[in-house]
Image (cartoon, rainbow, N blue to C red):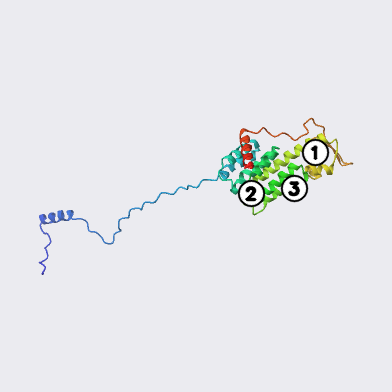
Amino acid sequence: MANGPPTPPPTTDVEIQDEARMNDTLPPAVDGTSDPAPEAASAQPPPQQSNQLQDPYGLIFPRIAELATQKRWIELIDIAEITEINANNDQKLSRLFVIVPLVLAYLIQNDLPIAKLVLERLPPDIRLNPLIKNLGLLTTSYSAGAYEQIYSNANALVNAVAKPEFQQPELAQVINIMVESFLFSFRDRTFLLLSRAYTSITLSLAEMYFGLGSSELLPVAARHGWAYDTSTKVLKPVPTNEPASFVAPAVSSLVNFNFIAQSVSQLEM
């Protein structure tokens, strides 16, 4: 099909105005190279919430560590007992975060029967844990009044958590604090006992009772008012009106009673 002759350009004012009006009404040309319209952002699924229950032993440990640092042993015992009673899974090794401070707190308070009961009610797999074994040896030697073994077992417990393979530095710090407090309270009670039992005691025997060398023992003995004869190497305790037995532990709480009852029932099963 033949094309017609080209349209002549507008020449008159009317033709020019008509062409201008026509150009204004035409839609803009679409450039094939222009950027495409952005796609709608795909909807992101909401983050899934974990349904896994948090470990009660790990959750309570920061509070136990705080109380240990403050040497608030009765509160530590109460919180640890409540956790022990309410926890559902007693097979977890994370239970050590509660059991070890609990036993040490009982030893510090000189509540030896309950400390032994806490260890006895543990399941076999946890009882075989090296840390629990060391703690059990300390408790046994304390129960037997084996002074030299008490100090060696306390040192063994501290050395065990100082090894590189022990991967719980927070628990190690709590154990160090509590073992130190236990030894301090134990030596303090020993001073009371020896002051009642002896009018004089040789330095070598006193070193055995206190687990200290002479350079450490003599300043401590002097602070307790003991005299030391350098010529005979004999210490002379100051007589005391304190009772001969160890300092009595603090009165157990109602939670303590419930814990004891539960422990006894489990041991009888």
Distance between mark 1 and mark 2 Cα atoms: 43 Å
Any mark on residue 152, and which? Answer: 3
Residue at point 61%, 45% (across, down): 97
Q: Is residue 218 left or right of residue 231?
A: left
Mark positioned earlier in the residue sequence (1 or 2): 2
User: Can I make out residue 211 in this image?
Assistant: no
Residue at point 83%, 43% (across, down): 205
Mark positioned earlier in the residue sequence (3 or 1): 3
Any mark on residue 27, and which? Answer: none
Q: Which quadrant of the structure image shows residue 229?
A: top right
Q: Nearer the viewer, mark 3 or mark 2?
A: 2
Residue at point 71%, 49% (across, down): 156
- The quadrant in which the N terminus is found is bottom left
Q: Amino acid at mark 1?
A: Ala
Residue contact between numbered discs 3 and 1, judged by CB atoms under 8 Å: no
Label 3's element? helix
Q: Which quadrant of the structure image shows residue 195?
A: top right
Q: Nearer the viewer, mark 1 or mark 2?
A: 2
Distance between mark 3 and mark 1 Cα atoms: 21 Å
The residue closer to the viewer here, 149 or 11, is 149
Label 2's element? helix
Any mark on residue 124, and which? Answer: 2
Image location (x, y in percent) of residue 171: 63, 46
Q: Amino acid at mark 2?
A: Pro
Distance between mark 3 and mark 2 Cα atoms: 25 Å
Any mark on residue 221, and which? Answer: 1
Image location (x, y in percent) of residue 192: 78, 35
Q: Is residue 216 left or right of residue 107?
A: right
Q: Amino acid at mark 3?
A: Ser
How many C-alpha atoms fall within 10 Å of the one at disc 2: few (<14), some, or many (≥20)? few
Mark positioned earlier in the residue sequence (3 or 2): 2
